[in-house]
Image: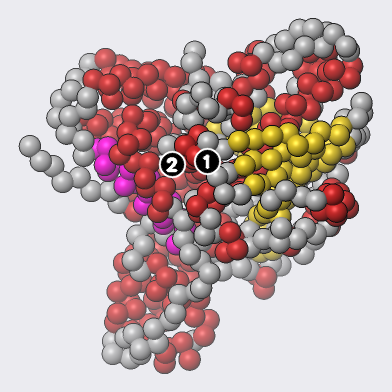
Amino acid sequence: MTATIERRSPDVVMRLDRMGSFHQCRLSFMRILLRRMKRERWTFEQARFDIDEHGVGTALYCAHTPERTYTLVAFAHDLPDDQRSDRVIATAWDTTFTLHDGVPTSDDVDRLRANVPLQEAGRVAGSELTLSRANRSVRLWSSVVDALAAGNQPNPASVEDVGYLMRTTAVYGSGKFGAADRQAVADRPELLAPFQAEMLTVYLIRTFVMDLVEHMARQASPDAVALDPALRRRFGIGNSTGLGMAPFLVTHPRLINNWIVAREEALRRVRSVEYATDAEQHHFHGVVAKSRTLVESWHSGHELQQAKLADLHRDLDLLDAHLAATELSAPFAWNALVDWAAETLSLEGQELVVSLLLEPYGDLVDELVDHMHADESSPAPIDGRATVGHVRELLERSYGWALGIDWDAQASDARAWYVSEEKLEPRLGERHEEPIGPYEQPLQPGRDASRMHDALRSWNEDDELGMVLRAHPEHRHVARRLFLIDDQPYAEIRDNTIAADMLPIDLLRAKLSFFGATRFDPRSDRWVRITMFQGAPFPHELSTADPDAWVYPAA
């Protein structure tokens, strides 16, 4: 028996409401990193921990790969409570960090101490790969220190409720503030997959934070105890992410295409499995059960996510009932399950099923991570000799979804993306209420493609594109994008990114799911809190731990 199963259509996958329902999966960047660490037997050391009784000082954490070393340089500060903020406009933090390429000298550490605590106001060098900062959880830090100092373990329910002791507000990389450009390290195998330097930074920050909280407990009492290892693993690193990240999915179409292609190809391969083995069925049932534990620990104060979580709880009940009545040993059972989910479950539930289906099939899908990077060092050339007829075909193929939108309607053209002068960060304004039109960034490809399509109506089919662009240079950026994405079906979000009802958190959720984030908690429609590496093995545990099983905790 044979079946030809295709990848899901971009018209289905690349819609914002679905992308805003993506979950982490085997191809997420945290899990890629941990699998490599385990496979290559990386070693780790706390090379320095000069932190005083007030929690102020310097620490160095080295990660040794088979060929080179990366060092987290951490600076701990005594930050008054009234200066602690999640906002990107903050100027002081509990801790600041950089990931140094190699082992820093004492002069390097002195240089970094003068700059890293300043974050955007300072500068790092090409020997640094990332710049980051984090603040303590006001709800949890003191209670954990007090419990350990008293010889007790912290309340597990409080740990699960919050999920982290510190929350980062940025992990900058790829050339920002003087750090090494992506191209300088992209040929290194351990950094070839996307965002591996940033994920390594967060992983080492988590180790430092746990050492720091135990250190502060020991400073408070000689009778302090260490965290129970199992409870210690339940602490991740929090993150607050806002509009600064949102345009990334629009400005990196090659990269986003490769991420989605890998995910959709992984799903296609699993759906094409004719007969699932008993072991694969058992594995799937196990992660379905554990996913309920993960969902039950996921809370949000925002009404949008509360509604989605209610749907997800219902979806899990429906999934359990369906699996109880379904024979997974039937031919192409996984394909049938995906079809059933598409007809029955919410988008949250459908995309959770996608993630869960990949879990038993590491041997089948993990190699796809080798194709998730992209060379974005050079722009796509514009073929000025292309005919108007050919360009029109390209526009209709990639932007057919946009051509039917009334872009003159106020609701369709309601917003404008711009860059703030103060922080040089992307912002989203109300076009018809604020004087931001002249500062608009080209982050609405659907509208601009539709305008170019309209402009071509006055040209003959055989006219050359170069003639059009000479008369209408305002369409050059669309023409360049057309040739960039022509052979990349998942490069473009097939939704209006400036509509009145567009939710920027959908853009954030899509990107963060590829990072491997969990417990998405929107604080508005423009920024979200997440948890990273919660449940993951620590460096000293990697040699005996499963680098994937930590994502779905046992009940």
Give SS at disc 2: loop
At label 1, which amino acid type do we have? Leu
- The quadrant holding residue 304 is top right
Residue nearest the viewer, comparing 235 with 252: 235
At horizontal 69% and vertical 51% (from top left) the residue drawn is 102
Neighbourhood count class around disc 2 (C-alpha, 10 Å): few under 14, some 14–19, many 20 upward: many
At horizontal 85% and vertical 17% (from top left) the residue drawn is 218
**Magenta range:** 253-271
Q: Is residue 535 above or below residue 65?
A: above
Q: Is residue 123 magenta?
A: no
Query: Is residue 538 in view from this perspective?
Result: yes
Quadrant of the image containing the N terminus: top left
Query: Is residue 241 in view from this perspective?
Result: no
At horizontal 59% and vertical 53% (from top left) the residue drawn is 246
Task: Left or right? Give the position of 254 relative to 138.
Answer: left
Q: Which residue is mark 1?
A: 33
Q: Position of residue 392 (x, y in %)?
A: 33, 77
Q: Is residue 524 above or below residue 275?
A: below
Residue nearest the viewer, comparing 79 with 503: 79
Residue nearest the viewer, comparing 117 with 555: 117
Q: Which residue is mark 2?
A: 27
At horizontal 43% and vertical 81% (from top left) the residue drawn is 382
